[in-house]
Image (cartoon, rainbow, N blue to C red):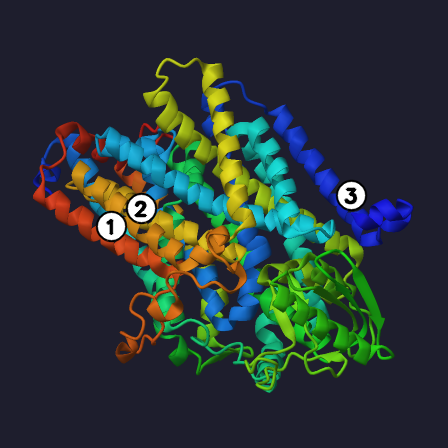
Amino acid sequence: MKAILNTPLIAAFTETEIWTWAFVGLTFALYAYIGWRSRVKNSAEFYVAGQGVPAIANGAATAADWMSAASFIGMAGLISFLGSDGSVYLMGWTGGYVLLALLLAPYLRKFGHYTVPDFIGARYYSETARVVAAICAIFVSITYVAGQMKGVGIVFSRFLEVDLTYGVIIGMFIVGFFAIVGGMKGITWTQVAQYFVLILAFLIPSVAISGLLTDSSIPQVGFASSDISGKLNTALIELGEKEYTQPFSNFSKLNVFCIAAALMFGTAGLPHVIVRFYTVKDVRAARYSAVWAILFIAILYTTAPALGMFARYNLITTLHQSSIQNVIVESPSGATESFDFPAQKSAAQEFILQSRTTAAANKTPLPKVVYSLHSPEGKPLDWATRWQNTGLLALDDWDGDGSISLKLRQESPGGQKRSEIAKIDKDIIVLSTPEVAQLPPWVIALVAAGGLAAALSTAAGLLLVISSSLAHDLYVRYLMPDATESQKVMIGRIAILFGILAAGYFGINPPGFVSEVVAFAFGLAAASFFPAIFLGIFYKRTNRAGATLGMIIGLAFTLVYIVLCTSNKLFPMLYDDPKNALPLLTESNYLFAGWLGGLGLGEQGIRPQGIGTVGMILNFIVTLTVSSLTAPPPKDVIDLVESVRVPRGAGTASDH
Amino acid sequence: MNPEEKEPLGSTENAHRYWIANLKIVSVLMGIWFLVAYVASIFGIEWLNQFKIGNLGLGFWMAQQGSIFIFVILVFVYAIWMDWLDRKHEVGDSK
């Protein structure tokens, strides 16, 4: 922003920035137009859009709802650092869809009420069960939206070159605007448009990079047929890292299993995706809508691992041995010093060292060091400078040779084995890949618009779930049973505002990378909803007491574990020195740490992303045990389960 | 199965047979799902990696590509198969 204020307006914009504004502006205008065209006046349309949506459109909307900033911005970047173990995200988020399509969606469509808490309340003939389910939905959705907020924040912080905090705040306003105006009907058609924006934005750079690096422009083909995997493995070994394709090099077998399962069963229990199946005509349409959705999802999910591998390869070949041209050191007070390399190299090193020592002695924040680099071939690496400005990438030429080395070495200051990348936020990989590969500016801009489309579409769907849980399931039911239609819509909108504020807080203080935060949401959904819905359909004997207790214990166990493992990031204000604070539960104390090595599952304890699997198993045990010890459900509930099992007569979804 | 599902009464009997057939279809498809996701891509990945597809180990390829293709096919087969079952038992909404 400083640059815009200090220089003539036009000169302040690079070609990439002009394209970015154009794409973001155009796509937002399109979403706003669609939202305005299909604006809603009654609460039925606000929550489920009527049943007039064709299966293919519903499939595209589901896919957009589903593929959030985690799929678009986060996943390929995370995979590019996890290598083979990154499969947990790929399989987890697509395999879970099979569970949803085969075990839950058709039956919930037949049941035909608005929300997941509606189903739980009716199936378990209990207002308590409904309230518990509504509370679970709120926790799951807020966690999930927090991930989206960080995603939106990253896009804005990169293109406006501002701090992540301001990026998240800008994102809160934009997401809130679309969710409050639209309602479900506005969102459905907007999401169809967003699907096409995000899939094009993902495919175009992937195809271009595949064409550059391999002999096939189809990323899925280039991924398998090219020798990039071999070259990347060799390069990583030289840098002192593990082979890319080697399984269980980052996560133990136990963790791969637990994380994949938590993501799968969580997928099936996500309230904002389930609600999508209420917007089609009948049970048959729900099944075909699932086919379209998984097909649309698979296009991105089979491209992402190829992009992840290509991105890692590109990053290493351009950044490793890149030479420093200039360094700017910005002290927390705002004073800047600039040094040109190689002439002022030793002066620069002395200054950096000195200002760090002073900062450490006075306990003030460390100075920000931004290097301008040239790649080994001598091309300027502007993207590296920009990401350093956002604080999401930090480099440190600690050996003082005037170039950046990615080799892991022991002899660094402090004696830890590390490279000269001090920090790299994995969420920047997808956004920076087109720049790293030197694709044209309009492709770089398109990726920004796609990332925003992915984050917006999911955030809007989730905010509606938060709104419907707070307003429809809790507030209107218990505090204002005779609210008018317009009052209900108004309360829903106020509830969305609450959701945005909560999600914004956790977007600024995220407990992890976008995909990790979203994985927490899936773990919570797996531990709370999946057993209650699945047993509700497939096991008639499940009763009120069992399901309610099961949900409470599953959610509480999972939530507490995640909070304990991420306490330092969630609540930094509680620590004296937040940057170096440890969470209450550290890796060596994770559940089962050191227990299961003998079974060939590895010594690692269960990571917070995978704990939902344990929570779900607890939930199943509690539900089945308590159900078998207490009275069976009444006759009308048995009739309800039997009617849900037969497709005929799925009317429109209704508010009882 | 619960005793109340065995009432031999006209449409209830049909609904019961429909449900049993439905469970069989779902079990077969979920069985394949389990093989693909857990056996091939997690617990058997190291063993499968001795085979190659292109330049990638088969286990690695299954975990990052093949499993996803098979999941799409599973959901598609389910929709077609259930269409057939709905018609056979005449329980669908008429099309």
Contact between labelled residues 1 and 2, with CB atoms less than 8 Å apart: yes
- State how far apart marks 1 and 3 are (Cα): 49 Å
- At 84% from the left and 46% from the top, the residue drawn is A4
Residue lying farthest front?
A: A362
Q: Nearer the viewer, residue A356 or A542?
A: A356
Above/below status of A243 relative to A128: below
Contact between labelled residues 3 and 1, with CB atoms less than 8 Å apart: no
As shown in the figure, which amino acid type bears the numbered disc 1?
A: Asn
Q: Chain of mark 2?
A: A
Question: Within 10 Å of the Cα at label 3, are there few (<14), some (14-19), or many (20+) other Cα atoms?
Answer: some
Q: What residue sits right under mark 2 in the picture?
A: A528
Q: What residue sits right under mark 3 in the picture?
A: A22
- At 41% from the left and 33% from the top, the residue drawn is A278
As shown in the figure, which amino acid type bears the numbered disc 3?
A: Ala
Indicate which disc, 2 or 3, sits on the residue closer to the N terminus.
3
Helix, strand or loop status at disc 3: helix
Q: What residue sits right under mark 1 in the picture?
A: A619
Q: Horizontally, is A138 left or right of A382 in the view?
A: left
